[in-house]
Image: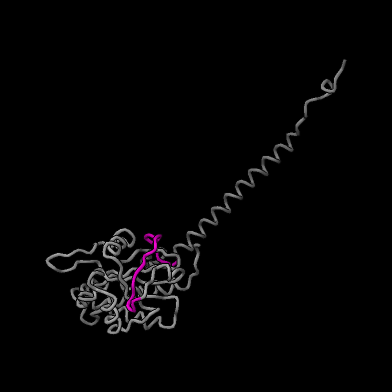
Amino acid sequence: MSTSAEKLEPAVRDPRKLRNTALILIALIVLGGALILMAYNKAAKNAAKDATPSYVGRIEKNLKVWRQDGSEGSLADMEGQVYVIAPVLFSKPEGWPQTREVLKRLSKHYAGNPDFHIVCLTIDPDHETPEKLGIQAKELGAELPQWWLAATREESVHKFLKNVLKMETIPYVKDGEWIYDGTLVVIDRDRHIRKGTTQAGETRRNNPPFNFEKAASWDAQHSPADDPNRVSRDLENLLTEVIDGLLAKPVTKP
C-alpha cells in the first residue's frame, strides 16, 4: 500500500535565491557593523570633547553629622545636588587660610543656587562641638542650608575620609599636632566623587587635586613676580568650571 510519504519529493532549492539571501544577510551584517562603528566613533569624539570631569568613586553609604546649629543632618539630605566637602580643623585656622577664602567666594558665587552646598567636616569632632561650630560659623559667615559646618564621631569621619573619599593622608596626631589632607572634594548629583579636567585639543587630562594650601605653596616658590597667584587662581577657576558643569547636568541614577 502506497503512503503519502512515498509521494514526497525532495525540495529543489533555487541557487539564485540562496545567493541573493546570503548577499542580503551579508549586507545587513556589514551595514549593522558600520552603524555600530559610527555610533562608537561619535560617542568617543563627544567624550573627548566633554569637559565633564572623571570620577574616582561614589558615595554609597550615608554619613550622619551634627551641624553648627546643633541640628542633625546627613549627606542623604543633599541627594541630587552638588556639594564640596572640605576636611578642616577649625581650631587651627592658620592651617587652611587659602581654602577658607576659596570657600567664602564659592558661597557668594552660588548664593542664589539651592542645589549647591559646602560641607566643612571637622577631623577632630571630640573637641569641636556644635557650640564651637556655631562660633566658627559666625566668623566664616557660614549659614544653613548652603554652608554646613559638620562633625560626626572621630572613627566615622576618619573612615569616611579614608575609605570613601580616598584622601591621601588620613588624619593623625604627631607631636601634639593634627596632620591631615585638606583637599576639597566635589560630589555630583549622582554622588560621584569628581576630579578636575582640562581640555588639550582632543585629549583630556586629570589635574592635581583641589588642594589650595599646596597651590599657594607652589605659587610662593614658582609663580612669576608679575603673577604671584597664578596656580591658585587657575585651580579655583577650574573648580568653578567643574561645579558649573555638574550643576548643569541632571540626575541620571536613581
Residue at figure coordinates x 44%, y 80% from the top left: 113
Residue 238, quarter of picture = bottom left
Residue 75 image offset from top left, x and y in percent: 39, 68
Q: How many marks?
A: 0
Residue 243 image offset from top left, x and y in percent: 40, 73
Residue extending farthest to the right is 1
Horizontal side, residue 202 vs residue 227: left or right = right
- Which one is in front, 138 or 39? 138
- Which one is in front, 58 or 33? 58
- Which one is in front, 186 or 236? 186
Residue extending farthest to the top is 1
Residue 146, quarter of picture = bottom left
Horizontal side, residue 44 vs residue 154: left or right = right
Residue 50 image offset from top left, x and y in percent: 45, 66
- Give the residues drawn in magenta, as a range: 49-70
Magenta-drawn stretch contains 207: no
- Which one is in front, 226 or 59? 59
Residue 193, quarter of picture = bottom left
| Residue 229 visible in the snapshot | yes
Task: Identify whether 41 is placed above or below 200.
Answer: above
Residue 135 image offset from top left, x and y in percent: 27, 82
Residue at figure coordinates x 27%, y 80% from the top left: 136
Magenta-drawn stretch contains 61: yes
Task: Identify whether 132 is placed above or below 18.
Answer: below
On the rendered image, what quadrant is the N terminus found in? Answer: top right
| Residue 58 visible in the snapshot | no
Task: Identify whether 253 is placed above or below 107.
Answer: above
- Look at the image and name its color scheme: one colour
Horizontal side, residue 249 vs residue 21: left or right = left
